[in-house]
Amino acid sequence: TESILKLLSQLKIKSIFFCVGNNIKNENSLAKEILSEGHEIGNHTFNHQTLWFSNKNKIKEEIELFEKEYFNLTKNKSKYFRPVKGRIDFNLYKNVIQKDYKLVMWSLLTLDYKNDLNIVKFAVTNFLKMNSIIVLHDSLKSKDVILDSIKFISERAEEKNYEFGVPAECLK
């Protein structure tokens, strides 16, 4: 994460980190660093649970446990929610909307979690469009390609004369 933050700073890119609440709890200083660099943190559940077809209590628990950690960190409520694996059903959608989250999905899935830069390059080369919302993963699965993926996306965007927007402004 520290390397990602450094690269994003060099490239002058702001992002939303959809964090797992348990990671905020265990890596509190890193979450603070994300925010201090001018990025946002969004709710991605407490335990990275796919809540698709879950009961209302499980949905509420995963969202609220994340919020507890986020509030301890910021004294605010988070604004954004992204469901794990993009899987959402009516119960989850209803909970997200009732809690006034902005539901953020993506238009470009890089498949970086396959840890193969050629796959990322193929996805970006063929599917990067104006106003794309790009999802990348800060995880062990993508650790070998994440920095090169960000650099490649930045280069492709520059070639197409695209600019990176500030998430809060782009998601109004």
Image (cartoon, rainbow, N blue to C red):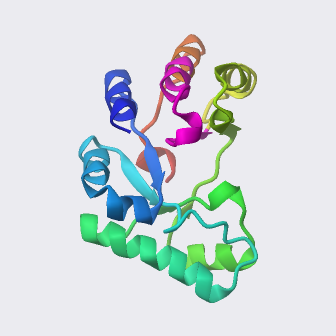
Picture coordinates of residue 2, whole percent (x, y):
33, 36
Instruction: Specify start and end residues of the magenta stretch as a single range.
Output: 133-152
Picture coordinates of residue 17, whole percent (x, y):
45, 48
Question: Could you say which quadrant of the image residue 57 lies in?
Answer: bottom right
Q: Is residue 138 above or below residue 97?
A: above
Q: Is residue 144 above or below residue 29?
A: above
Question: Could you say which quadrant of the image residue 86 lies in?
Answer: bottom right
- Residue closer to the observer: 94 or 116: 116
**Residue 126, can we see it?**
yes
Question: Could you say which quadrant of the image residue 165 lies in?
Answer: top left
Q: Residue at x 26, y 64 (%)?
A: 74
Q: Determine if the magenta segment contains residue 8.
A: no
Q: Is residue 70 above or below residue 57?
A: above
Q: Residue at x 51, y 50 (%)?
A: 171
Q: Is residue 167 above or below residue 86?
A: above
Q: Determine if the magenta segment contains residue 144.
A: yes
Q: Residue at x 35, y 45 (%)?
A: 39
Quadrant of image for the N terminus: top left
- Residue closer to the observer: 124 or 172: 124
Picture coordinates of residue 137, whole percent (x, y):
55, 41
- As drawn, the residue found furthest toward the bottom would be 57
**Residue 136, can we see it?**
no
Task: Give the side of residue 94 with respect to residue 99, left or right.
Answer: right
Picture coordinates of residue 154, whole percent (x, y):
51, 20
- Residue closer to the observer: 129 or 39: 39
